[in-house]
Image: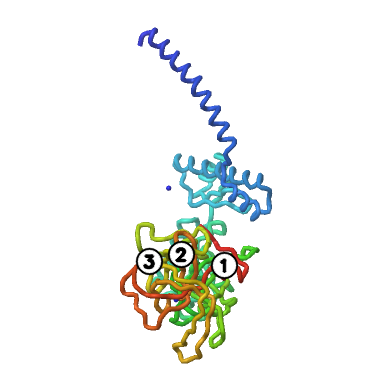
Amino acid sequence: MRNSRKYRLAAVGIALSASAVLGTQTLAQAQDTASTPRYQPEMVEALAASLGVSEKAAVDRLDRQDAQQARLAQLVKSGISGDGAFFDASGTLTVNADDQAEAARIEEAGLAARVPARGQAALDGIKAELDALAAKKVPSGVVAWSVDLASDKVTVKVNNERGAAAKAFLAAAAKHGAAVQIVRGQEELAPQAAIYPGSKMTFNNTSNYCSVGYGARDSSGRQYLVTAGHCVTNTLRYDGAAFAQGYKTRYALGTRSVDMGILTVNSGHSIVTAVGTWGQGSTRTVAVKGVSRAASGAAICKSGATTGWTCGTIGSYNNTVTYKDLNGGPDTVVSGLATSSVCTEGGDSGGAYISGNMAQGMTSGGPIGQECTGGVNSRGTSHFQPLDDALKYYGLTLNTN
């Protein structure tokens, strides 16, 4: 649910005085620079870890990289544009040259050079041809194609080449001979989304849907979506892409239940630490600063895929309700819910309730046939699953802004 000798001497005197002042400023600035890291510490740490080197070695590599790119920029200003450039695994910048004479000039400037069989311009032309072909008909099964300057080829990655469009695409690529490298057995790709609480999420491959709740993590940093228990299913999709997988729920049709559940968030996806307000107001989102249960009567708003952003007040806590199954299944008794005067409709389930900047819970249910026709302040009632209870039960920590 971001000129004369006199004046010349005077001028010299002024200049000397300014130099003294500037000298002091320069010293202070140098001291500031010495105490300020050249690169963001998190970047240095990550680079060192990925390369398997010390943080000092990582900084040295970044320095060498900057120096080489600066020399390349000077070459471009002097009239040597080259035909593409790339860093190799060791961090050496290699520049494609049009001929041996140009390669010699590049090397004189202190950079590595080569005269490639093709070069960037020719490879870009091949890729543009493939792009045009794909624009006519999507080559499903062909994962990606790109210019690889280091290998001096266009690389085409393939998962499945059985389809007619894929076959035609690969045949066109193969006409370029050694200029194209086809790599088979590649994983398929999918969009990776940062998803706002309150967004629409569909079940498996159906049109049925709930709304996104909150992102949280366990002690090892694994990411979860916390939502209404009756919204937990095998696969949840956002804009067509699978982003979360069913994990645990305390909701079971026809049995006394608690409407809380969690799903694991797929790698590459994330739940944003701000609640979407469906275009309301100037800020458009509300940052999630923490989770703290608001008292009865406190103002509260909800974000949901069906009715968007609706607001009201909190009623009471620790409610037990009986939910009717609209598909003809047995009724279900659900306990531990809170009430509110926030209007909801079907599909809002799982969506985020927030009071100020404090997360409160996720939509559980509301009256059958209720219509929220008054916008933000639609009159109505609803029940929500308190978030603090769910986090405590599953041993999770809310992701905050």
Residue at image location 55% in from the left, 39% down from the top: 109
Which image quarter: residue 221?
Answer: bottom right
Q: Which element is circle 1 on?
A: loop
Q: Where is residue 94 in the image (x, y as percent from the top left)?
A: 56, 49
Checking the image for residue 354, the label placed there is 2
Q: Residues within 10 Å of mark 1 (few under 14, many from 20)?
A: few
Judge depth for marks 3 and 1 and give the one in front. 3
Q: Residue 278 carries which label?
A: 3
Of the 4 image quadrants, the one containing the N terminus is bottom left
Callout 2–callout 3 Cβ contact below 8 Å: no
Mark 3 is on which residue type?
A: Trp
Q: Which residue is located at x 52 percent, y 70 percent?
A: 386
Q: Which mark is residue 267?
A: 1
Element marked by disc 3: loop
Amino acid type at mark 2: Ile
- Disc with the residue nearer the chain's start (2 vs 3): 3
Work out which residue is located at the far left of the displayed protein and give it: 374
Front-most of residues 137 and 236: 236
**What percent of the width, then of the height, locates residue 141?**
50, 76
Q: Residues within 10 Å of mark 3 (few under 14, many from 20)?
A: some
